[in-house]
Image: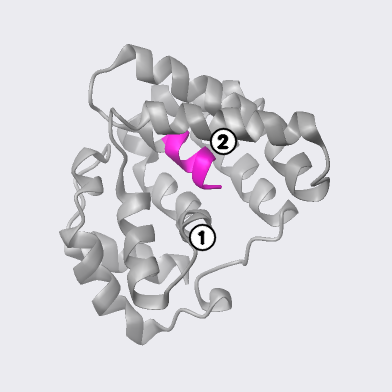
Amino acid sequence: MDALTHNVESYLSPAYHPLCDGIALEGARLAARSLARAVHEPANLEARGDMMMSSMMGAIAFQKDLGAVHSCAHALGTVRDMHHGLANALMIDTVLAWNASAVPAKFEELAHVVGSGGGAVGFLAWLRQLKQSIGIAPGLAAAGVRREDIPRLVAIASADICHRTNPRPVSEADFARLFAEAM
């Protein structure tokens, strides 16, 4: 999920880098094709190879930068000692749903790349189904996050640099709302 998040967030970043955008879209396409297979069939070398390539592509693409999903994930790692990939997986659909109105054409392209169609609505439905199919907890509470953690999560996410290139500016109140919605 971290590889997918790197590719998606890099693509959605408003920073200008067309080469990184192309790499991010291909990384997202590979993850869409192989992430669930790699989880369900760990010995599937083709799926694992696709995910290794997706991971590498995401690392190249995030030269362009990331976004608020990663700021939230960094906070979850700090406050709850949560695995980074899980933290991204738990926050990605909530944050991206909030970002959708800022970059509708980019969500249209992401939906096309993953084969869902339907712009942001189709892409987010695909993402939620993917998360469920690979066993990602339905929300932060199911992963051990408590509502009383939110103020500390907000403080850490707000101080994190990644959200500076989010498609929408993110305030402390926005982070509080995003963490609460992800519970």
Do we see residue 6 in this rendering? Answer: yes
Q: Residue at the location (39% across, 51% down)?
A: 95
Do we see residue 117 in this rendering? Answer: no
Magenta range: 1-8
Q: Residues within 10 Å of mark 2 (few under 14, many from 20)?
A: many
Q: Residue at the location (77% across, 28% down)?
A: 46
Q: Residue at the location (39% across, 83% down)?
A: 147
> Is residue 4 shown in magenta?
yes
Residue 55, given in percent of the width and then of the height, sits at 53, 35
The three-letter code of the residue at mark 1 reads Leu
Q: Mark 1 points at which residue?
A: 90
Q: Which of marks 2 and 1 is nearer the N terminus?
A: 1
Using the image, tell me which numbered label, if any, was put on residue 123: 2
Give the answer, above or below, for where 149 lies relative to 117: below
Give the answer, above or below, for where 35 lies relative to 129: above
Q: Nearer the viewer, residue 43 or 8?
A: 43
Q: Is the magenta stretch mostly helix, strand or loop?
A: helix
| Secondary structure state at the residue bearing disc 1 | helix
Residue 70, given in percent of the width and then of the height, sits at 35, 51
The three-letter code of the residue at mark 2 reads Phe
How many numbered discs, if any? 2
Visual colour scheme = one colour
